[in-house]
Amino acid sequence: MVSEVKSISGSSIPLVGNDIDTDRIIPARFLKCVTFDGLGEHAFADDRKALNGAHPFDQPQYQGAKILVVNRNFGCGSSREHAPKAIGDWGIQALIGESFAEIFFGNCVANGVPCVTVDAATSKKLLELIAANPQVNVTVNLETMQVQCGDFTGNISMGEGARNMFVSGSWDACGQLVAQAEQVKATAVKLPYMAWNICDKLE
């Protein structure tokens, strides 16, 4: 399993506004799902309904986008993991913003969706470029720590610990566990409180 995330390229969605909270990203009534499957179709459900087709997630020119560009304090509010799940299920693979709520950022890391920060001037420039040309290619490079949008290049930031997790693939805890299944079994049989033969029957 290859889980490294070093570079994400594609078209983008400009989502203007500060303090967009997790209840707006995925309203509470959709949290009763047993799995996260299908959450993407409900991303920003109430905002989209209120704007009656004018929300960027509904506009045809932004369909198929891989990168979401936002402003300040994105993902604030309650700590629901459903928020990055909904964004990821919609197709977003990376976020660029001026700042992100800490718990939302951590949930994105756990789900393999990097959130990189830029200064206000870079955010404004990216939002303008994408709105003017929705099909412009945007690349988020976690190795060079730069974002490229057409002819424009800007610097991005991310804590070194999180960046290393993406570049090395170590963000994917479940993937690492599955990849080391034989070593896990070998260790488990040595533990007096583990009945691994029972676990084998449950597989």
Image (cartoon, rainbow, N blue to C red):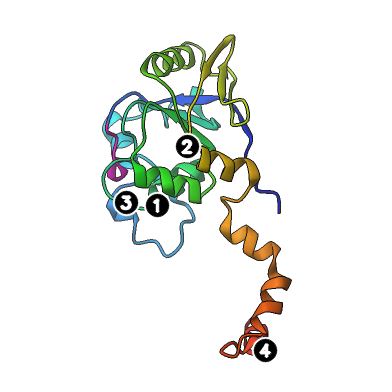
* x then y, percent, for residue 85: 45, 49
Disc 1 to disc 3, C-alpha distance: 9 Å
Under mark 3, the amino acid is Ser
The reply to whether the C-beta atoms of the residues labelled 4 and 3 are less than 8 Å apart is no
Q: Secondary structure at mark 2?
A: loop
Per the image, the residue denoted by label 3 is 79
Disc 2 to disc 4, C-alpha distance: 42 Å
Query: From what the image shows, is residue 138 above or below residue 38?
Result: above
Number of the front mark, 2 or 4:
2
Under mark 4, the amino acid is Asn
Per the image, the residue denoted by label 2 is 159
Identify the residue at image location x=44%, y=50%: 39
Which is nearer the N-term, disc 3 or disc 2?
3
Q: Which residues are magenta?
A: 19-24
Identify the residue at image location x=60%, y=20%: 137
Q: Nearer the viewer, residue 91 or 99?
A: 99
Under mark 2, the amino acid is Gly
Q: Secondary structure at mark 3?
A: loop
Q: Secondary structure at mark 4?
A: helix
Per the image, the residue denoted by label 1 is 82
Relative side of 18 to 199, left or right? left
Disc 3 to disc 2, C-alpha distance: 20 Å
Disc 4 to disc 3, C-alpha distance: 38 Å
Which is nearer the N-term, disc 4 or disc 3?
3
Identify the residue at image location x=60%, y=90%: 192
For residue 197, the mark is 4
| Mark 3 nearby-residue class (10 Å; few <14, some 14–19, many ≥20) | some
Under mark 1, the amino acid is His
| Mark 1 nearby-residue class (10 Å; few <14, some 14–19, many ≥20) | many
| Mark 4 nearby-residue class (10 Å; few <14, some 14–19, many ≥20) | few
Which is nearer the N-term, disc 1 or disc 4?
1
Q: Nearer the viewer, residue 40 or 99?
A: 99
